[in-house]
Image (cartoon, rainbow, N blue to C red):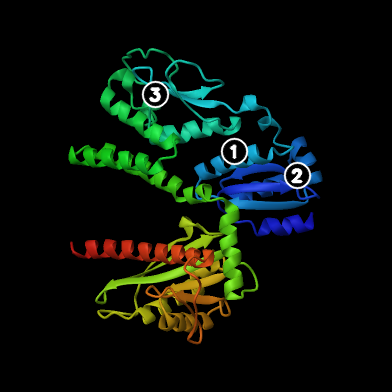
Amino acid sequence: MTSLKEKLKNLPNKPGVYLFKDRSGSIIYVGKAKSLRKRVASYFTKTQDIKASILLERLKDIDYILAGSEMDALLLEDELIKKYRPRYNIALRDDKTYPYLKLTINEKWPRLFLARKKEKDKALYFGRFQGSMVREVIRLVKKLFPIRWCKESPLRSRQQPCLYYRIGSCAGPCVNKIAREDYMKLVEGIVSLLEGKMDIALAKLEQEMKRASANQEFERAAILRDRIRILQKMIEGKELLSAPAPRLLTEVNELKTALKLKKPPMRIECFDVSNIQGSNIVASMVSFYGGVPLRNDYRKFKIRSVEKKPNDTAAIFEVVKRRYTKTLMKRMPLPDLVMVDGGVAQVNSALKALNGSAAAGLPLIGLAKREETICLPGSKTLSLPRNSSALKLLQRIRDEAHRFAVAYHRQKRQKAAFF
């Protein structure tokens, strides 16, 4: 059990799916977690139940796959359980525990709920879903698109709204708080979301927020803004589900070989600088793990050492030094690979900052935009084929760092225009 507890220490405090394996390497249990470290640690407490005790007796190894959000972890858990049918996911083995989600578009005021079988009633059915997760999906969907929770059909008018309306989880059609046209827009958003068209669902929310703001319905616009943020977090991890984890890990392993690293660069941190002729100079840091973006570990920096003139190398030196010598050094784990958006000059500047920190010796590269050449310390370069999986991974990370830096610079520039 000692080796397992050592593995536990290295589990990230991120959402994802954990896989318990037996002596032969077979997956015997799959579970999802908001925090992999905390959830798996709970199995090793003294208060474990009988099921956990039996499971631990056969547990010989732990693996995991990161997810970008709670919704992604739910969906990925469902996919893996259906694929591997682990022995100890007993409640999920019977197909009867894979219900549908039913959206009653055949009613004036549609509802969304669990259904055990499809009926010829002109309603929309989605799934099947894992029994233990379907209610979580309903909760998350209705958090974004607050259609009614009541079961009655047809819906009766009331004098007073229910508790769900009072806490903002229902639009209140029973008390005429929403027009049917607007209610059906919520339903359209749900359809887009459950069909996997998250970008369309997001566009509908953004459209409604703009309309509410234009009509000076600022309280409603604020609620819609919060729902947009929830959906954006769900979209963040969508790439993990659309591209299977083995492909992402292949990219990482190919990068290890190309750069001749001692271990796969699972965690990569990339830095970029943004400014216009030296004004409002800012920098960004993005973090990826196993090819998946870790949005909670992104950081923005206002550059302090450079003023009124563009100096990317000095800015890179400052931001790398601040990351690996200040409080972030204590609060965040070290990456397996440090990357900068730029060429030889930026890499050498970053190397100087690293050498003066506790992170000295970390592998370091840069990716120049024009030729897409990998720059190494000591003015060395490396070219990978344009169709290389490793290069595509680096480009994806570099482009995300650039996007994040530009967005922050635009924000600072707009703010400065008002003061």
Instruction: Name the disc covering residue 148, or none.
Output: 3
Q: Quadrant of the N terminus?
A: bottom right
Q: Amino acid at mark 2?
A: Lys
- Relative image position of residue 43 (x, y in whole percent): 71, 45
Mark 2 highlights which residue?
Answer: 46
Contact, mark 2 vs mark 1 (Cβ under 8 Å): no
Density class for disc 2 (Cα within 10 Å; few <14, some 14-19, many ≥20) is few
Is residue 156 shown above or below 211?
above
- Relative image position of residue 410 (x, y in whole percent): 27, 63
The picture quadrant where one finds residue 322 is bottom left
Earlier residue among tags 2 and 1: 2
Q: CA distance from mark 3 to mark 2?
A: 42 Å
Judging depth in this view, the residue of 249 and 180 nearest the camera is 249
Identity of the residue furthest to the bottom in this view? 378
Q: CA distance from mark 2 to mark 1?
A: 29 Å
Is residue 339 shown above or below 177?
below
Earlier residue among tags 3 and 2: 2
Judge left or right: residue 84 versus residue 342. right
The secondary element bearing badge 1 is classed as helix
The answer to whether residue 247 of the structure is visible from this angle is yes
- Relative image position of residue 80 (x, y in whole percent): 63, 42
Q: Nearer the observer, disc 3 or disc 2?
A: 3
- Relative image position of residue 379 (x, y in whole percent): 48, 86
Q: Amino acid at mark 3?
A: Arg
Mark 1 highlights which residue?
Answer: 78
